Amino acid sequence: MLSVAVDEKKCTGCMKCMRKCPTEAIRIREGKARVMEDRCIDCAECMRFCPNRAWIARTHPLSVLSRFKYNIALPSPALYSQFSRDILPNTILKGLKELQFDDVYDVTFACEFYGVVLKEFFDHYRERRPAISSLCPVVVKLIQVKFPDLTDLLVPLETPRGIAALDIKLRKSRELGIKYEDIGAIYIAPCPAKIIPIVQPQCKEVSPLDAAVSIADIYGLLLSAMRKINNNREELHLSGGSGISWAITGGAIRYLGIENCLAVDGIYNVMEALEHLEDEKLNGIKYLELRACPGGCVGGALNIDNHFLARNKILMLIKMFENRKPLDREKVEELYKKQFFTCDIKPKPLPMEPLDRDTMRAIQKVKERDKLFETLPRIDCGACGAPTCRSLAEDIVQGRALITDCVFKLLEKGKS
Amino acid sequence: MQNHETGEFLLEKRFSIEGGDFIHAGEVSSAIKKILKDIGIRSEIVRRASIAAYEAEINVVCYARKGEVTFRVTQQCLQLLFKDEGQGIVDIELAMQEGYSTATEAIREMGFGAGMGLSNIKKNVDRLKIDSEVGIGTCVEMIINT
């Protein structure tokens, strides 16, 4: 399953996505972008850089709500950064409730619980290599595909969004006498990738979340809904600054007091950090917080606001709610005993195939590829539909392209 | 290390390293790692080869004017040959000890030269041979059985 798709009517084959794709998963065929599914890591760089809005997130439409008898919105902490500075989290949560949801759950509240358990995890962590945060589905997929040996290092805890969903669904099911399956936990997502662990669970056998709706899709509706809310004193926003801090890279590390942490964001930086880790150049680091988007979830491709402004807004909120109230430790213990944080399954390594499963043939292909590459113009013009001359050489060796796909080679052939 | 010990090679790649070029240090070992992944070598072997190649590459950058790398894949093993023109090693046995370093202050300031290079190489390869002549250069030959 891919978290993005191409709208062929809008795609002009302009190659912007192909050039930006960090795993070289995109080719242009018959003038349209095509994705090689086994290479895609759902980072949405293609969507971010498309000038024609041809990439569509495969998040759920709002109509998904009709599948359930009772719907609960669980917004990504990044949502709090998407409005003007005078709109506070409580207003946003009330707006969601006004929208079409029966209830909302403040995910930043669950982030606070998660932080406590994560700190506990690191107090007992004695491994030589650092543990890697498992919150960003792009990072999880990237590790499974390109750094399969590192999958064991992913922090084995359910995500805050998952914990939030379990907590509210079980509670509502009991309170209202509705079946657990009839309650929809709908994540309000800042990026397309959040759909992946819902369809392919990474921690529990069945995902606690039921659907993911894009922030961009509901933004307009939410703005009008917020204008309609009443001024009652209903407190939906429950977290302090530490919970909100999870929206930005490195935000939570400051609160947790885990020693020797490294926080990295942006997909290319994340890949570099993982290369370093693979080569054992990150000795002494205990926790590696990796986020695929610039700035963390505030930089997700489905957000509205610029990620620098969004980060600034989050910093303001952290300060505003800094000393709001002490953390509810009893609640954390209760959820811990219920095994909300426990992972029943682990992400499996999904290593990219070598050039051939037979080593001898793979070596032959490396030789052919490198020899072909020497004959290509090496200007990475992209006209052949591959991002680089090197990738074209590989495509040819793998039978996915022809040498005459290269315009220079075609011209040469025409002349002779 | 003669060819008859290791058999005919199936693949050979050559690279050169510029002494003192810290910005590009690590590119040769990355290229080697990429090839090993392309041909489907077991990840544990890839890891060991990458670490050994990286350390050897850094040594050339730190202590030599230039170096040549020959990387070979045979039926049974990987061969890595790093040959440089540089200051050479006075006492190889001493240089192999963890923490022993002749790195200058400038190199240490860049985060290199902790004296772990050669010992780290030794830990990750199956056979290691070092020839060195002071003032002329060093030749490091590594073999990792596949």
Image: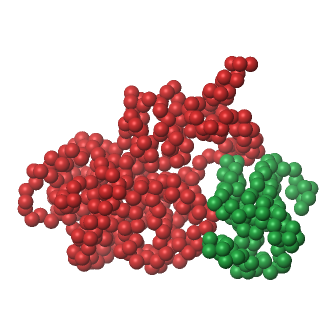
Chain colours: A red, B green
x, y percentage for residue A41?
48, 48
The quarter of the rendered structure image containing the N terminus of chain A is top left
x, y percentage for residue B84?
81, 63
A180 displayed left or right of B30: left
A81 displayed left or right of A228: right
Residue A370 or residue A182, whichever sits in front: A370
Looking at the image, can residue A105 be seen?
Answer: no
Q: Residue at x 62, y 46 (%)?
A: A353
Q: Residue at x 28, y 61 (%)?
A: A313
Is the residue A315 above or below the residue B103 in the image?
Answer: above
Is the residue A369 above or below the residue B122 in the image?
Answer: above
User: Which quadrant of the structure image shows residue A377?
Assistant: top right
Q: Residue at x 79, y 48 (%)?
A: B11
x, y percentage for residue A200?
42, 50
Residue A292 or residue A159, whichever sits in front: A292
x, y percentage for residue B3?
90, 55
The quarter of the rendered structure image containing the C terminus of chain A is top right
Is the residue B135 above or below the residue A191 in the image?
Answer: below
